[in-house]
Image (cartoon, rainbow, N blue to C red):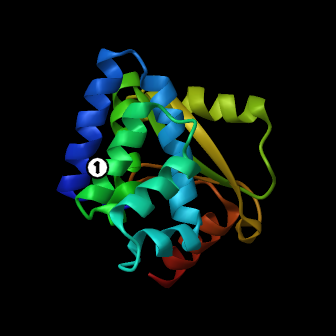
Amino acid sequence: MMSSTVARRYALALFQIAKEQQLLDQMEEELRVVKETVSDNEDLQAVLKSPKLTKEKKKEILATAFANVNPHVLNTLKLLIDRHRENIISDVAYDFIELSNEEKGIAEAKVYSVRPLTDEEKEAFSTTYAAKVGKKSLRVENIVDTDLLGGIKIRIGNRILDGSLKGKLDRLGRQLLG
């Protein structure tokens, strides 16, 4: 996800508040929900971008949708509405999560496999690959990809480790042609 400098500033301000008040884990989870809700709900995006609705109505909708979040998170969302920056809500949440992960020494990892991984396998990936990328642990998201044929593919940040059968066959094909 491409993040703007403006989104980074809002995320950093919220992050500093979360650290000062020792609410980092709680606010991170709440912002994950906000990010997922705003990103996945096209109707909500359309409402927030609508020029026909007043700022107050948009803030009321957000207050209703996210009634259980920390007041600092809700106030940040309302501030984004006030400043006509509703289009960067997901970016602010993404940047906050990145800052939180950096603080904790955690990296986000997507593991593509042919079948769902067990919790033990996810933990093994976290233990094995965290040291390779200089982190304490990995937060593993398993994505089932039936195109792999076998093996796994791991994406950590901008690194891709391809141990899939499809990847190996593709590399072998390039070697034979090259």
Task: Please give the name of the residue rendered at 56% of the width and 45% of the height, measured from the top-left corner.
Answer: 33
Circle count: 1
Residues 19 and 170: in front is 19
Residues 33 and 65: in front is 65
The image quadrant of residue 149 is bottom right
Q: Position of residue 113 (x, y in %)?
A: 72, 55
Task: Please give the name of the residue rendered at 57% of the width and 56% of the height, measured from the top-left corner.
Answer: 37
On the picture, is 161 further left or further right than 149? left
Which image quadrant: the N terminus? Answer: bottom left
Which image quadrant: the C terminus? Answer: bottom left
Residues 2 and 153: in front is 2
Asked whether the viewer can see residue 109, the reply is: no
Q: Position of residue 62 (x, y in %)?
A: 49, 53
**In the image, residue 8 above or below residue 177:** above
**In the image, residue 17 above or below residue 79:** above
Asked whether the viewer can see residue 37, the reply is: yes
**Which three-letter amino acid code belongs to the residue tagged 1?**
Leu
**In the image, residue 174 above or below residue 139:** below
- Label 1 neighbourhood size at 10 Å, few (<14), some (14-19), many (20+)? some
Task: Please give the name of the residue rendered at 52% of the width and 63% of the height, measured from the top-left corner.
Answer: 39
On the picture, is 147 further left or further right than 111? right
Q: Position of residue 107 (x, y in %)?
A: 45, 37
Task: Please give the name of the residue rendered at 58% of the width and 64% of the height, measured from the top-left corner.
Answer: 40
Q: Position of residue 153 (x, y in %)?
A: 60, 55
Q: For mark 1, what is the residue?
A: 79
The image quadrant of residue 132 is top left
On the picture, is 61 further left or further right than 71? right
The secondary structure type at the circle numbered 1 is helix
